[in-house]
Every structure is written in C-alpha cells, then in structure tokens.
Image (spheres, grey):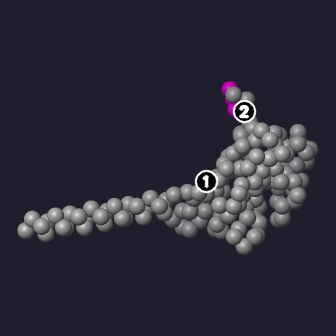
Amino acid sequence: MKPQRNNNRNVRYFSTVFILSAFLLSACSQIAAFQQSSVAPAAHGKVKVKKDDNRNYNISVEVTDLAEVEKVYSKNFSYIVWMETDKGRTKNLGKLVSSKGFLSGQRKAKLETVSTIEPVKIFITAERDENESQPGNRTVLETRKF
C-alpha cells in the first residue's frame, strides 16, 4: 500500500507544480525600456504590457525627466503615445499626461490604457492634434520591438 500512496502524492505534487507554473507564466507581463533619444536625452522610461483574462492588453507607459513639450516644440503640441502592431499598423493610444513631483521637482509622465490588439512597439511623438490617426515625424521616444 505504501508505494501506491507515495505515487499518488507525486502525481498530485507534479500536477500542482505544473498548474501553478502555467498560471504564473500566463500572468507575466512584457516590459520594455525606451531607447535614449537625441530629442529628449534626459528622458527615460518603460512600457509594461500585460494580457488580461479577457484577452485585452493593459498598457502602462511611464516616463521621467521628459522636457515639457513647449520647451522642445511649442505650446500647441502634445506628447502622444502610439503603438505598432505586428502587421505594421499604428494606433493612437492617447495623450501622455505629465506632472512635476511635489518635493523632488522631477517631471513624470504617465499613460494607462487598454487595447484589444497586442502591441509590438510603443513610441511617443509630438503632435498638434491629440486625436491624430497617424503619427507625424516628431518621434521623441521609442522602444525596440518586443
């Protein structure tokens, strides 16, 4: 009887480990850093993409030390976050909202959004109209493809 009992424990143990591993791997998110930019050399940040239970992609963009858009272009511009799909299409994800730290004075910008399409690259441009359907040629920051 003892060998059967140990065999059942082993099966349960390995089944539990397999299920937990599969769950943890599916819950992982992709993180990509923005490449250094000649337009905004002090800026740095990251993008986090996580697939949820509804097969949507939660996209979180965080950038620090990004110069105010007025100082780089003019006050008529906004920083817009874009995604590129695996088919080469681009989608406007929204306006990057920036703020200044209360005590530190460090500039921080953030955007959180959801997409039904998986992004393969994220980039930020300066645009006159925040509702643009296609990005202009003023790329400020971009990630590598992930």
As drawn, the label of residue 118 is none
Q: Is residue 37 magenta?
A: no
Disc 1 packing (10 Å; few <14; some 14–19; many ≥20): some
Work out whether residue 20 or residue 104 is closer to the camera in this orientation and state it. Answer: 20
Q: Residue at x 87, y 54 (%)?
A: 138
Disc 2 packing (10 Å; few <14; some 14–19; many ≥20): few
Badge 1 is on which residue? Answer: 31
Percent coordinates x, y for residue 36 in the rendering? 76, 46
Q: Residue at x 9, y 65 (%)?
A: 2
Percent coordinates x, y for residue 136 in the rendering? 87, 59
Q: Which of the image's four quarters has the C terminus?
A: bottom right
Instruction: Please report the bounds of the magenta region as a residue range.
Output: 99-103
Q: Is residue 59 above or below residue 102?
A: below
Q: Residue at x 88, y 39 (%)?
A: 71
Badge 2 is on which residue? Answer: 106
Percent coordinates x, y for residue 72 in the rendering? 88, 42
First along the sequence among labels 2 and 1: 1
Q: Amino acid at mark 1?
A: Ile
Residue 82, quarter of the rendered image: bottom right
Q: Is residue 22 above or below residue 106?
A: below
